Image: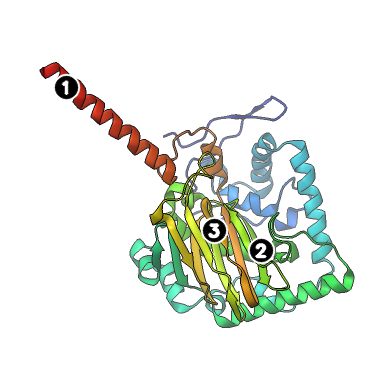
Protein backbone atom coordinates (compact mmCIF):
# COMPACT_ATOMS: atom_id res chain seq x y z
CA UNK A 1 0.00 0.00 0.00
CA UNK A 2 1.30 3.50 -0.81
CA UNK A 3 2.34 5.66 2.11
CA UNK A 4 0.05 8.52 1.04
CA UNK A 5 -3.68 8.49 0.36
CA UNK A 6 -4.80 9.58 -3.08
CA UNK A 7 -6.11 13.03 -3.94
CA UNK A 8 -9.66 13.90 -3.06
CA UNK A 9 -12.07 16.47 -4.46
CA UNK A 10 -13.58 19.56 -2.95
CA UNK A 11 -17.28 20.03 -2.49
CA UNK A 12 -17.08 22.73 -5.18
CA UNK A 13 -15.61 20.18 -7.64
CA UNK A 14 -12.02 21.41 -7.64
CA UNK A 15 -9.10 19.12 -6.86
CA UNK A 16 -7.55 18.67 -3.43
CA UNK A 17 -3.79 18.36 -4.01
CA UNK A 18 -2.74 17.62 -0.43
CA UNK A 19 -2.21 14.01 0.64
CA UNK A 20 -1.96 12.14 3.95
CA UNK A 21 -0.19 9.04 5.21
CA UNK A 22 -2.27 5.86 5.44
CA UNK A 23 -0.83 5.05 8.89
CA UNK A 24 -0.14 7.71 11.54
CA UNK A 25 3.43 8.45 12.66
CA UNK A 26 2.79 7.49 16.29
CA UNK A 27 6.23 8.51 17.55
CA UNK A 28 5.68 12.08 16.32
CA UNK A 29 4.57 14.54 19.00
CA UNK A 30 1.87 16.75 17.48
CA UNK A 31 1.76 20.48 18.07
CA UNK A 32 -0.94 22.24 20.09
CA UNK A 33 -3.07 24.57 17.95
CA UNK A 34 -5.23 25.98 20.75
CA UNK A 35 -3.79 29.50 20.59
CA UNK A 36 -4.56 29.63 16.84
CA UNK A 37 -8.26 28.91 17.32
CA UNK A 38 -9.38 32.29 15.98
CA UNK A 39 -7.40 31.75 12.77
CA UNK A 40 -8.41 28.11 12.14
CA UNK A 41 -11.45 26.92 10.23
CA UNK A 42 -11.93 23.85 12.41
CA UNK A 43 -11.46 22.67 15.97
CA UNK A 44 -7.78 22.96 17.06
CA UNK A 45 -7.85 19.39 18.38
CA UNK A 46 -8.66 18.13 14.90
CA UNK A 47 -5.42 19.64 13.59
CA UNK A 48 -3.41 18.04 16.40
CA UNK A 49 -4.95 14.64 15.64
CA UNK A 50 -4.51 14.95 11.88
CA UNK A 51 -0.88 16.10 12.14
CA UNK A 52 0.42 12.55 12.69
CA UNK A 53 -0.87 11.65 9.20
CA UNK A 54 1.18 14.36 7.45
CA UNK A 55 3.89 13.29 4.97
CA UNK A 56 7.40 12.97 6.44
CA UNK A 57 8.64 16.16 4.78
CA UNK A 58 6.01 18.22 6.63
CA UNK A 59 6.12 16.74 10.13
CA UNK A 60 8.83 19.15 11.32
CA UNK A 61 7.53 22.22 9.49
CA UNK A 62 6.19 25.28 11.32
CA UNK A 63 2.70 25.13 12.79
CA UNK A 64 1.37 27.65 10.29
CA UNK A 65 2.67 25.64 7.32
CA UNK A 66 1.16 22.43 8.73
CA UNK A 67 -2.12 24.15 9.58
CA UNK A 68 -2.41 25.55 6.05
CA UNK A 69 -1.74 22.11 4.54
CA UNK A 70 -4.29 20.39 6.80
CA UNK A 71 -6.80 23.17 6.20
CA UNK A 72 -6.62 22.46 2.48
CA UNK A 73 -7.54 18.84 3.13
CA UNK A 74 -10.29 19.55 5.66
CA UNK A 75 -11.94 22.18 3.46
CA UNK A 76 -12.09 19.65 0.67
CA UNK A 77 -14.31 17.33 2.68
CA UNK A 78 -16.37 19.87 4.63
CA UNK A 79 -19.39 21.52 2.97
CA UNK A 80 -20.07 25.22 3.77
CA UNK A 81 -23.10 24.32 5.89
CA UNK A 82 -20.92 22.10 8.11
CA UNK A 83 -18.29 24.82 8.47
CA UNK A 84 -21.00 27.29 9.48
CA UNK A 85 -22.25 24.84 12.11
CA UNK A 86 -18.69 24.34 13.40
CA UNK A 87 -18.21 28.11 13.70
CA UNK A 88 -21.50 28.52 15.60
CA UNK A 89 -20.64 25.65 17.95
CA UNK A 90 -17.26 27.20 18.65
CA UNK A 91 -18.94 30.50 19.59
CA UNK A 92 -21.36 28.57 21.82
CA UNK A 93 -18.49 26.85 23.66
CA UNK A 94 -16.56 30.07 24.04
CA UNK A 95 -19.60 31.71 25.61
CA UNK A 96 -19.82 28.92 28.19
CA UNK A 97 -16.12 28.68 29.04
CA UNK A 98 -15.75 32.47 29.39
CA UNK A 99 -18.54 32.56 32.00
CA UNK A 100 -18.59 29.20 33.78
CA UNK A 101 -16.26 28.83 36.77
CA UNK A 102 -15.04 25.21 37.25
CA UNK A 103 -15.42 23.63 40.67
CA UNK A 104 -12.54 21.12 40.33
CA UNK A 105 -9.86 22.58 38.06
CA UNK A 106 -7.76 19.43 38.45
CA UNK A 107 -10.23 17.65 36.13
CA UNK A 108 -9.40 19.91 33.21
CA UNK A 109 -5.90 18.52 32.64
CA UNK A 110 -4.88 14.88 32.56
CA UNK A 111 -3.50 13.47 35.85
CA UNK A 112 -3.28 9.71 35.27
CA UNK A 113 -2.37 8.61 38.81
CA UNK A 114 -5.24 10.68 40.24
CA UNK A 115 -7.76 9.52 37.63
CA UNK A 116 -7.04 5.82 37.05
CA UNK A 117 -6.60 2.78 39.27
CA UNK A 118 -3.04 1.29 39.36
CA UNK A 119 -3.97 -1.97 37.59
CA UNK A 120 -5.28 -0.03 34.60
CA UNK A 121 -2.18 2.20 34.42
CA UNK A 122 0.09 -0.86 34.55
CA UNK A 123 -1.77 -2.47 31.64
CA UNK A 124 -1.52 0.74 29.60
CA UNK A 125 2.21 1.07 30.30
CA UNK A 126 2.79 -2.44 28.89
CA UNK A 127 0.21 -2.05 26.08
CA UNK A 128 0.10 -5.69 25.06
CA UNK A 129 -2.91 -7.89 24.49
CA UNK A 130 -1.82 -10.00 27.46
CA UNK A 131 -1.61 -6.98 29.79
CA UNK A 132 -5.07 -5.81 28.74
CA UNK A 133 -6.62 -9.27 29.02
CA UNK A 134 -5.16 -9.62 32.54
CA UNK A 135 -7.34 -6.77 33.85
CA UNK A 136 -10.40 -7.37 31.66
CA UNK A 137 -13.32 -9.71 31.40
CA UNK A 138 -15.08 -10.43 28.11
CA UNK A 139 -18.48 -11.74 29.25
CA UNK A 140 -19.81 -11.52 25.70
CA UNK A 141 -17.83 -11.33 22.41
CA UNK A 142 -16.64 -7.76 21.86
CA UNK A 143 -17.82 -6.47 25.26
CA UNK A 144 -14.88 -5.72 27.57
CA UNK A 145 -15.29 -4.81 31.25
CA UNK A 146 -12.62 -3.65 33.71
CA UNK A 147 -11.96 -1.44 36.72
CA UNK A 148 -10.78 1.96 35.52
CA UNK A 149 -11.51 5.12 37.53
CA UNK A 150 -10.47 6.14 41.03
CA UNK A 151 -13.42 6.75 43.43
CA UNK A 152 -12.26 10.35 44.01
CA UNK A 153 -12.28 11.06 40.27
CA UNK A 154 -15.86 9.78 40.05
CA UNK A 155 -16.88 11.99 42.99
CA UNK A 156 -15.25 15.09 41.52
CA UNK A 157 -16.77 14.54 38.09
CA UNK A 158 -20.23 14.14 39.62
CA UNK A 159 -19.73 17.33 41.61
CA UNK A 160 -18.46 19.18 38.53
CA UNK A 161 -21.51 18.16 36.51
CA UNK A 162 -23.82 19.19 39.36
CA UNK A 163 -22.01 22.53 39.60
CA UNK A 164 -22.39 23.07 35.84
CA UNK A 165 -26.09 22.24 35.98
CA UNK A 166 -26.53 24.66 38.89
CA UNK A 167 -24.87 27.38 36.81
CA UNK A 168 -27.24 26.55 33.93
CA UNK A 169 -30.29 26.95 36.17
CA UNK A 170 -29.05 30.19 37.72
CA UNK A 171 -28.07 31.81 34.42
CA UNK A 172 -30.95 30.26 32.44
CA UNK A 173 -28.37 29.34 29.81
CA UNK A 174 -29.77 27.00 27.18
CA UNK A 175 -27.44 24.04 26.61
CA UNK A 176 -27.25 21.27 24.05
CA UNK A 177 -27.88 17.78 25.39
CA UNK A 178 -25.51 14.87 24.60
CA UNK A 179 -27.55 13.35 21.77
CA UNK A 180 -31.02 13.05 20.28
CA UNK A 181 -32.06 10.28 22.71
CA UNK A 182 -31.10 11.80 26.09
CA UNK A 183 -33.06 14.72 27.54
CA UNK A 184 -30.73 14.99 30.55
CA UNK A 185 -26.97 15.07 30.94
CA UNK A 186 -24.30 17.39 29.55
CA UNK A 187 -21.64 17.49 26.86
CA UNK A 188 -18.35 17.63 28.79
CA UNK A 189 -16.50 19.03 25.77
CA UNK A 190 -18.74 22.11 25.84
CA UNK A 191 -17.62 23.40 29.23
CA UNK A 192 -13.87 23.01 28.97
CA UNK A 193 -13.07 19.31 29.30
CA UNK A 194 -12.41 18.71 25.60
CA UNK A 195 -8.59 18.72 25.76
CA UNK A 196 -8.48 16.41 28.78
CA UNK A 197 -10.89 13.98 27.11
CA UNK A 198 -8.90 14.02 23.86
CA UNK A 199 -5.82 13.03 25.89
CA UNK A 200 -7.98 10.42 27.64
CA UNK A 201 -8.85 8.89 24.28
CA UNK A 202 -5.42 9.14 22.65
CA UNK A 203 -3.34 7.90 25.59
CA UNK A 204 -5.68 5.50 27.39
CA UNK A 205 -8.36 4.24 24.95
CA UNK A 206 -6.53 4.12 21.63
CA UNK A 207 -3.76 1.81 22.97
CA UNK A 208 -6.47 -0.72 23.90
CA UNK A 209 -8.47 -0.23 20.70
CA UNK A 210 -5.33 -0.60 18.60
CA UNK A 211 -4.96 -4.13 19.96
CA UNK A 212 -8.55 -5.26 20.53
CA UNK A 213 -10.67 -3.27 18.04
CA UNK A 214 -8.44 -3.14 14.95
CA UNK A 215 -11.24 -4.23 12.62
CA UNK A 216 -13.27 -1.05 13.31
CA UNK A 217 -10.48 1.53 13.10
CA UNK A 218 -9.27 1.17 16.67
CA UNK A 219 -5.68 2.09 15.78
CA UNK A 220 -6.68 5.34 14.04
CA UNK A 221 -9.06 6.92 16.57
CA UNK A 222 -8.58 10.68 16.20
CA UNK A 223 -11.61 12.50 17.62
CA UNK A 224 -14.25 12.08 20.31
CA UNK A 225 -17.59 13.17 21.70
CA UNK A 226 -17.53 13.20 25.52
CA UNK A 227 -20.60 13.54 27.71
CA UNK A 228 -22.43 12.37 30.81
CA UNK A 229 -25.90 10.86 30.89
CA UNK A 230 -28.22 10.87 33.91
CA UNK A 231 -30.85 8.26 34.69
CA UNK A 232 -33.44 8.10 37.46
CA UNK A 233 -37.13 8.49 38.15
CA UNK A 234 -36.70 12.28 37.78
CA UNK A 235 -34.28 12.03 34.82
CA UNK A 236 -34.12 9.83 31.73
CA UNK A 237 -35.54 6.51 32.91
CA UNK A 238 -34.20 4.20 30.20
CA UNK A 239 -32.65 4.28 26.73
CA UNK A 240 -33.99 2.59 23.62
CA UNK A 241 -32.27 0.09 21.35
CA UNK A 242 -29.61 1.85 19.24
CA UNK A 243 -26.05 1.98 17.92
CA UNK A 244 -23.57 4.77 18.73
CA UNK A 245 -22.08 7.34 16.38
CA UNK A 246 -18.65 5.97 17.22
CA UNK A 247 -16.12 3.34 16.20
CA UNK A 248 -15.39 2.47 19.85
CA UNK A 249 -17.46 3.44 22.90
CA UNK A 250 -16.26 3.79 26.49
CA UNK A 251 -18.99 3.79 29.14
CA UNK A 252 -18.02 4.26 32.80
CA UNK A 253 -20.47 4.43 35.70
CA UNK A 254 -19.70 7.35 38.05
CA UNK A 255 -22.38 6.41 40.60
CA UNK A 256 -24.36 7.12 42.76
CA UNK A 257 -26.82 4.74 44.49
CA UNK A 258 -29.38 3.20 42.11
CA UNK A 259 -31.34 0.11 41.20
CA UNK A 260 -31.85 -1.21 37.66
CA UNK A 261 -30.35 0.50 34.63
CA UNK A 262 -28.69 -2.61 33.15
CA UNK A 263 -27.26 -2.36 29.65
CA UNK A 264 -28.49 -4.96 27.17
CA UNK A 265 -26.43 -5.94 24.13
CA UNK A 266 -27.69 -7.59 20.96
CA UNK A 267 -24.80 -8.07 18.52
CA UNK A 268 -22.68 -5.95 16.15
CA UNK A 269 -24.25 -4.85 12.87
CA UNK A 270 -23.40 -2.68 9.87
CA UNK A 271 -25.88 -0.06 8.64
CA UNK A 272 -27.54 -2.49 6.24
CA UNK A 273 -28.18 -5.11 8.93
CA UNK A 274 -28.86 -2.91 11.95
CA UNK A 275 -32.44 -4.18 12.32
CA UNK A 276 -31.82 -7.87 11.64
CA UNK A 277 -32.68 -10.67 14.04
CA UNK A 278 -30.61 -11.18 17.19
CA UNK A 279 -28.97 -14.58 17.55
CA UNK A 280 -29.23 -16.32 20.97
CA UNK A 281 -25.46 -16.11 21.58
CA UNK A 282 -25.58 -12.32 21.10
CA UNK A 283 -27.88 -11.67 24.07
CA UNK A 284 -26.06 -10.15 27.04
CA UNK A 285 -27.04 -7.93 29.99
CA UNK A 286 -24.56 -5.89 32.03
CA UNK A 287 -25.03 -4.39 35.51
CA UNK A 288 -23.13 -1.17 36.22
CA UNK A 289 -20.50 -0.83 38.96
CA UNK A 290 -19.17 2.61 39.91
CA UNK A 291 -15.65 3.17 38.55
CA UNK A 292 -15.86 0.16 36.25
CA UNK A 293 -15.74 0.61 32.47
CA UNK A 294 -17.36 -1.20 29.61
CA UNK A 295 -15.69 -0.88 26.20
CA UNK A 296 -17.38 -1.99 22.99
CA UNK A 297 -17.67 -1.37 19.26
CA UNK A 298 -19.96 1.60 18.56
CA UNK A 299 -21.98 -0.55 16.14
CA UNK A 300 -22.75 -3.03 18.91
CA UNK A 301 -26.53 -2.74 19.30
CA UNK A 302 -27.55 -1.94 22.85
CA UNK A 303 -29.90 -0.07 25.17
CA UNK A 304 -30.45 0.66 28.87
CA UNK A 305 -33.20 -0.80 31.03
CA UNK A 306 -35.17 1.38 33.42
CA UNK A 307 -33.43 2.80 36.48
CA UNK A 308 -36.09 2.01 39.07
CA UNK A 309 -34.73 4.00 42.03
CA UNK A 310 -31.92 6.41 42.87
CA UNK A 311 -29.85 8.13 40.21
CA UNK A 312 -27.22 6.74 37.85
CA UNK A 313 -24.69 8.96 36.06
CA UNK A 314 -22.34 7.60 33.41
CA UNK A 315 -19.39 9.11 31.57
CA UNK A 316 -19.52 8.25 27.86
CA UNK A 317 -16.71 8.71 25.36
CA UNK A 318 -17.57 8.11 21.73
CA UNK A 319 -14.22 7.53 20.00
CA UNK A 320 -14.12 8.09 16.24
CA UNK A 321 -11.76 7.43 13.35
CA UNK A 322 -11.99 9.73 10.31
CA UNK A 323 -9.73 7.30 8.42
CA UNK A 324 -12.03 4.32 9.06
CA UNK A 325 -15.12 6.34 8.10
CA UNK A 326 -13.55 7.47 4.84
CA UNK A 327 -12.47 3.94 3.91
CA UNK A 328 -15.88 2.50 4.84
CA UNK A 329 -17.49 4.57 2.07
CA UNK A 330 -15.80 2.35 -0.50
CA UNK A 331 -16.43 -1.00 1.16
CA UNK A 332 -19.30 -3.43 0.66
CA UNK A 333 -18.12 -6.35 2.81
CA UNK A 334 -18.09 -5.80 6.58
CA UNK A 335 -17.85 -9.46 7.56
CA UNK A 336 -14.74 -8.79 9.67
CA UNK A 337 -16.96 -7.08 12.29
CA UNK A 338 -20.66 -7.28 11.30
CA UNK A 339 -22.07 -10.60 12.55
CA UNK A 340 -24.82 -10.66 9.92
CA UNK A 341 -22.40 -9.95 7.06
CA UNK A 342 -20.23 -12.78 8.39
CA UNK A 343 -23.24 -15.13 8.60
CA UNK A 344 -24.29 -14.30 5.02
CA UNK A 345 -20.73 -14.81 3.76
CA UNK A 346 -20.47 -18.19 5.48
CA UNK A 347 -23.83 -19.18 4.00
CA UNK A 348 -22.67 -18.23 0.48
CA UNK A 349 -19.49 -20.29 0.97
CA UNK A 350 -21.54 -23.25 2.25
CA UNK A 351 -23.83 -23.11 -0.80
CA UNK A 352 -20.89 -22.82 -3.18
CA UNK A 353 -19.24 -25.86 -1.62
CA UNK A 354 -22.48 -27.88 -1.94
CA UNK A 355 -22.82 -26.77 -5.57
CA UNK A 356 -19.24 -27.79 -6.39
CA UNK A 357 -19.72 -31.16 -4.71
CA UNK A 358 -22.90 -31.82 -6.70
CA UNK A 359 -21.11 -30.80 -9.93
CA UNK A 360 -18.28 -33.22 -9.19
CA UNK A 361 -20.70 -36.07 -8.53
CA UNK A 362 -22.47 -35.41 -11.86
CA UNK A 363 -19.16 -35.48 -13.71
CA UNK A 364 -18.22 -38.80 -12.08
CA UNK A 365 -21.52 -40.27 -13.13
Q: Which residue is mark 3?
A: 249
**Foreground residue among 44 and 309:** 309
> Viewed as shown, does residue 28 lie left or right of 161?
left
Q: Quadrant of residue 31?
A: bottom right
> Viewed as shown, does residue 112 lie left or right of 98?
left
CB atoms of marks 2 and 1 within 8 Å? no
Sequence-first disc among 1 and 3: 3
Give how far apart the Cα atoms at labels 2 and 1 are: 60 Å
Residue beneath the point at 46% across and 57% down:
209
Circle nearer the viewer, 2 or 1: 1
Asked whether residue 207 appears in the rendered view, the answer is: yes
Give how far apart the Cα atoms at labels 2 and 3 are: 12 Å
Q: Quadrant of residue 305?
A: bottom right
What colouring method underlies this structural image? rainbow
Q: Position of residue 146 (x, y in %)?
A: 45, 71
Circle 3 — which element? strand
Count all numbered tags in the image, as a single digit. Answer: 3
Q: Which residue is mark 1?
A: 360
Residue beneath the point at 41% across and 70% down:
123
Near mark 1 (Cα within 10 A), the count class, few <14, some 14-19 or many ≥20, is: few
Circle 2 — which element? strand
Position of the C terminus by quadrant: top left
Amino acid sequence: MDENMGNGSRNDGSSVESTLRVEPCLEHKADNYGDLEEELEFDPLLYSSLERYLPDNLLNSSRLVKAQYMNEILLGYSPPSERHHTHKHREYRQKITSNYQPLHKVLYTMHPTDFFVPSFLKAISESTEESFRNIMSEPSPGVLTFEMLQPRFCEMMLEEVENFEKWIRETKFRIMRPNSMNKYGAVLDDFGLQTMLQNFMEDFIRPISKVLFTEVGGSTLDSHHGFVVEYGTDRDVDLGFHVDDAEVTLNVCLGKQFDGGELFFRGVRCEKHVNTKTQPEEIFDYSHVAGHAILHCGRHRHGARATTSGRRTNLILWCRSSMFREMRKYQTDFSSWCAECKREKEERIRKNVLFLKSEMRLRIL
